[in-house]
Amino acid sequence: MLTDATPQAEPPLETTGQVLDLADGEEARVSERRSDFLDGMSVRESESVQLGCGRLQYVFRLTSGRDLRILAYSVAPEYIMQVVLDPDWVALLLSLNPRSDFVFNGRETAPWDLSVSAGADGYMARGTDRHCIAVSMRRSRLIGACAALGGVPPDEIRLRDMVLPAESRHNWRLRHALVAVANPIEATPSAPGLFPLPQATENDLISLLAAEFLPAVRRRAEPSPFPCDALHVVRQAAAVTRTVPAPGLAEMCAAAGVGQRWLHKCFIDVLGVSPYRFVRLARLTRAREQLLACDSSPAQIKTLSLSLGYRLSGRFAADYRALFGENPSQTLQRRAVS
């Protein structure tokens, strides 16, 4: 169970280092596939786009209970992740690395802020050298805990997207508790990188979460700090890339219902990249996922490049190598060995 020790004024860096030191063997898992990384987190839809050069590997550890799942992970290159959870679940993100910029739904957040995604559209997160804790929690359990703590009916609890800064004693208790659970030093894994969450610990964490959420979900809704219109534009335009291999600006503008100037501004504000760069990096990231996910032959690399809108397989290989540091054939060979 969690202790009631008085937290320090700010989290010591050595505590952060322990969380990020995801050890080898059974302590953590390493995968290049997003599907492996997000397995067990109640995710309905997800897509990632790598922005910076380097080999994208997820180093992660999942601690799972009945109503609460906690994922500690590290990812080095800059990338964007779009995630939509199952409607019955709420997502929380806690960035731990003070040297990494972390942007949630177009808003820069500070280390140890809790970014909350409770809407039907999910969230977009961007960052470099990310060391984070991601939490998914059953929506009904969180609402029930908040209602019980506040002595109000559950229908008075209104969850929404928000950022909760670490300011009060309860704030730090919750964050230190999440660190402790995400870093199970003496726990025995049920599978590589997978740890059980004891029921008593889960209940304590839910109580701490309710204490943090209650003031925000009971007061009158404030104007959203997120660029809601820009988020909507980016989501609508980005969705085109999943159905059209190489959409043009005209197609993305038509899908989002805006002009090219506003489309460009929205992408820069929310994702930090232009629409053109996003499309190019999105199809390269998608190509890598396909190479890692199936038993392809070298001859099929050309077919894959054509399906993603590349007319010249040599251009595809050059762009792929520039982003991931290896040729498509090398990715295929490593997949075959694993």
Image: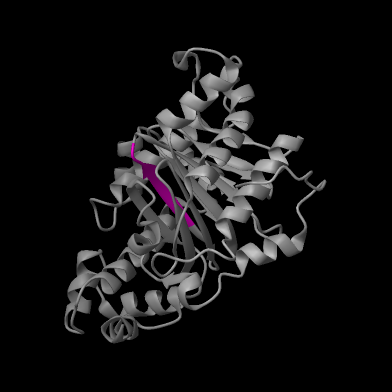
Residue 53: x and y in percent read: 51, 72
Residue 228: x and y in percent read: 49, 31
Q: Is residue 56 left or right of residue 210?
A: left
Q: Is residue 41 above or below residue 161?
A: below
Residue 1: x and y in percent read: 60, 47
186 or 325, which is in the foreground?
186
Q: Quadrant of residue 211?
A: top right
Magenta region's main secondary structure?
strand
Magenta stretch in the rendered image: 80-86
Q: Is residue 151 magenta?
A: no
Q: Residue at x 61, y 65 (%)?
A: 20
Q: Residue at x 42, y 32 (%)?
A: 139
- The way the protein has been coloured in the rendering is one colour
Q: Quadrant of residue 67?
A: top left
Q: How many marks?
A: 0
Q: Is residue 124 above or below residue 71?
A: above
Residue 242: x and y in percent read: 27, 52
Q: Residue at x 33, y 77 (%)?
A: 315
236 or 251, which is in the foreground?
236
Q: Quadrant of residue 131?
A: bottom right
Q: Residue at x 28, y 57 (%)?
A: 246
Q: Is residue 9 above or below residue 27?
A: above
Q: Is residue 82 magenta?
A: yes
Q: From the image, which quarter does the C terminus lie in?
A: bottom left
Q: Is residue 221 above or below residue 98?
A: above
Can residue 34 be seen here? The reply is yes
